[in-house]
Amino acid sequence: MMALAGTLCLGAVASQPAKKGKKKAVKTTVVTPAEPAIEPVDASTFSYAFGVAQAPSLKQYVEQREGVDSTHYEDFIAGLNGQYSEAEIAKFKAIVAGSGIAEQNKTQIIPNLNKSAAGDEKADFVKNDLLVKGLIDGIRNQSTLTADSAQKIFEQQIKYREQIVKKENQDFLATYAKNDSVKKTASGLLYKVIKQGEGALPTDTDKVSVNYEGKLIDGTVFDSSYKRNKPATFGVTQVIKGWTEALKMMPVGSTYELCIPYELAYGERGSRNIPPYSTLVFKVELLDIVKK
């Protein structure tokens, strides 16, 4: 009876209407699944696996950065395995260094020397065997020349070549200036008007759009926007002096031929594709003044 009475009592309480007021939030408990336990890897397995994982990138490195091809993998592996003594490794390093310089002599040093000393990188002026003998005798301290006296001989030929180049360029300017259509400014700039435009004149603060072709006095084209099929855009004062002067004389729509002495171009030192003391000949089309 007591149990029945308790049940009835609870039922009566449950059937009573809820009191008005704030509802209590029901708390929800989120159960996060336990992460699976990570088992350790033994040191031997880890070490070997790391090597295998890194092998592809190591192959790429030695091929691309060290120049080792697949036919010499076993030689590389011999070194990797520590099969050579420190003395042997030092010898190998010396051989590699000497071979690298030999390659540079053929592909870079001698062509550049030929260009400076004889005016043509393909000239046969610099003799590879004698250059190498000079290097060897100098390293061994067996030369009858001192380094200072040898340097003076080198400089003598470079200065001689500079005299030749200056004379050639001066003669070209003198011949060019004799043309009746050529005009000369106070600075020494020579120019011909191929087409006179009717647009505005650029000022120092303007940017311009131009098509152009630049040549050395031997006809070598060293730069051309025509070949790139795209006009160039730059500030009037961001170019060589001869260009800046000419642009400010050219109305938009003009085409001029400029003959620029080295003093108004790249000077006594030249530039990437331009020898020292070079007179430059440009065809220049002034297309537009670029709006800011």
Image (tube, rainbow, N blue to C red):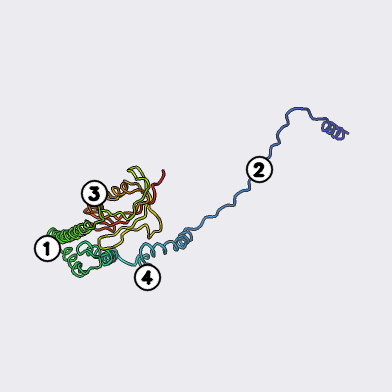
- The secondary structure type at the circle numbered 1 is loop
Residue 34 versus residue 5 in the image, above or below: below
Quadrant for the N terminus, please: top right
Q: Distance between the residues labelled 3 and 2?
A: 89 Å
Q: Distance between the residues labelled 2 and 1?
A: 90 Å
Residue 30: which numbered mark, if any? 2
- Image mark count: 4
Of the numbered discs 1 and 4, the one sitting upstream in the chain is 4
Mark 1, residue position: 145
- The secondary structure type at the circle numbered 4 is helix
Q: Distance between the residues labelled 1 and 3?
A: 50 Å
Q: Residue at x 65, y 44 (%)?
A: 31
Looking at the picture, tell me which residue is in the foreground, 201 or 85: 201
Which residue ends up furthest to the front in the rendered image?
A: 180
- The secondary structure type at the circle numbered 2 is loop
Amino acid at circle 3:
Thr
State if disc 2 and disc 3 touch (CB < 8 Å).
no
Mark 3, residue position: 185
Q: Which mark's residue is nearer the viewer, 1 or 4?
A: 1
